[in-house]
Amino acid sequence: MQRRPMKVFIFALALATLTAAAAAPKSIQPVENELLAVEKRIIEIYRENVPAVVNVRSIAVQTNIFYGEEIEIPRGMGTGFVWDGEGHIVTNFHVVQGGDEFVITFHGDKGEYKAVVQGVDPKNDIALLKLEKRPKNLRYANIGKSKELVVGQMAMAIGNPLGFDYSLSRGIVSATGREMLGIGGVKIRNMIQTDAAINQGNSGGPLLDSSGRVIGMNTMIASRSGSSAGLGFAVPIDTISKAVPQLIEHGKIIRPGLGITVLDDPRVRDQYPKGAVLRWVDPDRGAGKAGLKGMRRGSFGRLYFGDVIISIDGNEVNTLDDIYFVLSKFKIGDTVTVEFLRDDKKQKAKVTLQEL
């Protein structure tokens, strides 16, 4: 009575074996991994661009007060990209801020290369490094333009997120013309928003278009958790292209200015909801020579507000940041029309711009 189940089991096993044998092909042929055209293009872009992407390691050097020895303290890590054949590297200012020495590494290169700061533009979170010694076959990025970017076009980021070096992420240009608060509380204008994954360590890395051209520099994310939430922001390449030549030549950005400071006090808005109230005017510079006045005290010690600038060449301004942005379109020596209020009456003055 116990033999029947055993026979059934053996039969079932034999049947399964025969069925599998009949179904099996005579020879197993390797199947080629079929890639879509868009996938092939992404791979091509990565391979073309990753040699120009670098890992930037920032080191602070301190002296041991007891032994007088120098101690190297890691400050952080970010990304950068090679700008030209001379060994200039673009990255974020906040990547190099507080660092004394900078170590650069390249994809597929086991060597380490030292770099020095050539110049910085903190207002736009841009830093330019220069390699002390260039590697053989140095590759540099293909620089594009950001003015004509269209929402919805493809965007790719290469960087070192959370220490995972030379990682690629893909998304789209989600928006253009964003204003984000940068280093020191100054707004960075015209930023590119992307949903390509960006995390800590991506800072300073390139944002690429579908042609493999750099359209921006990945700079920050908006996230409650500190990790990517699909809200990444990049400094537009047009801003960088304008800054780099000055950083190479002068080590800083030479900006035209009016020779003023602005009163930054929320209580001022009760009386002047719009415009930039002048706190101080340099009498020897543009605005002072044109007759504009800052805050002053009356004969009995009463403090009077200065003139209130409401527009520059027809562009409305309300803060010092607005003034910087408007003046960035001009150069030193240009003359602009400044419209201002004095005793609640509108006046205009021609002001010649001078170096800040």
Image (cartoon, rainbow, N blue to C red):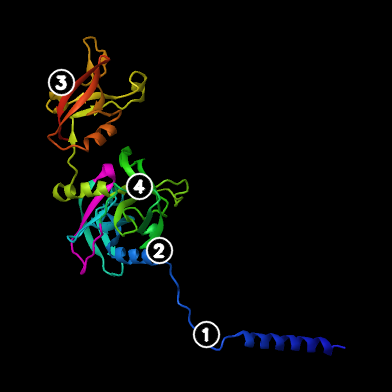
Determine if residue 97 is in view: no
Decide which of tag 3 and tag 2 comes sooner along the chain: 2
**What residue sits right under mark 4 in the picture?**
192
Q: Residues within 10 Å of mark 1 (few under 14, many from 20)?
A: few
Three-letter amino acid code at the position of disc 2: Val
Give me the C-alpha separation between circle 3 and circle 2.
61 Å
Residue at disc 4, secondary structure: strand
As measured in the structure, the alpha-carbon distance from the residue carrying label 1 to the one carrying label 3 is 89 Å
Percent x, y for residue 343? 25, 14
Q: On screen, 205 above or below 253?
A: below
User: Which residue was labeled with disc 1?
Assistant: 28
Kind of residue at badge 3: Gly
The residue identified by callout 3 is 291
Q: Position of residue 137 (x, y in %)?
A: 21, 69
Q: Is residue 111 visible?
A: yes
| Label 4 CA crowd tier, 10 Å (few <14, some 14–19, many 20+) | many
Q: Nearer the viewer, mark 4 or mark 3?
A: 4
Q: Which residues are magenta?
A: 121-142
Residue at left offset 26%, top offset 18%: 305
Q: Earlier in the sequence, mark 1 or mark 3?
A: 1
Q: Position of residue 126 (x, y in %)?
A: 26, 48
Q: Nearer the viewer, residue 210 or 305?
A: 210
In the rendered structure, the answer to whether residue 324 lies left or right of residue 166 reads left
Kindly report the distance in space between the C-alpha atoms of the residues bearing marks 1 and 4: 50 Å
Q: Residues within 10 Å of mark 2 (few under 14, many from 20)?
A: few
Q: Is residue 73 magenta?
A: no
Q: Is residue 20 left or right of residue 122?
A: right
User: Which of the 4 image quarters holds residue 85?
Assistant: bottom left
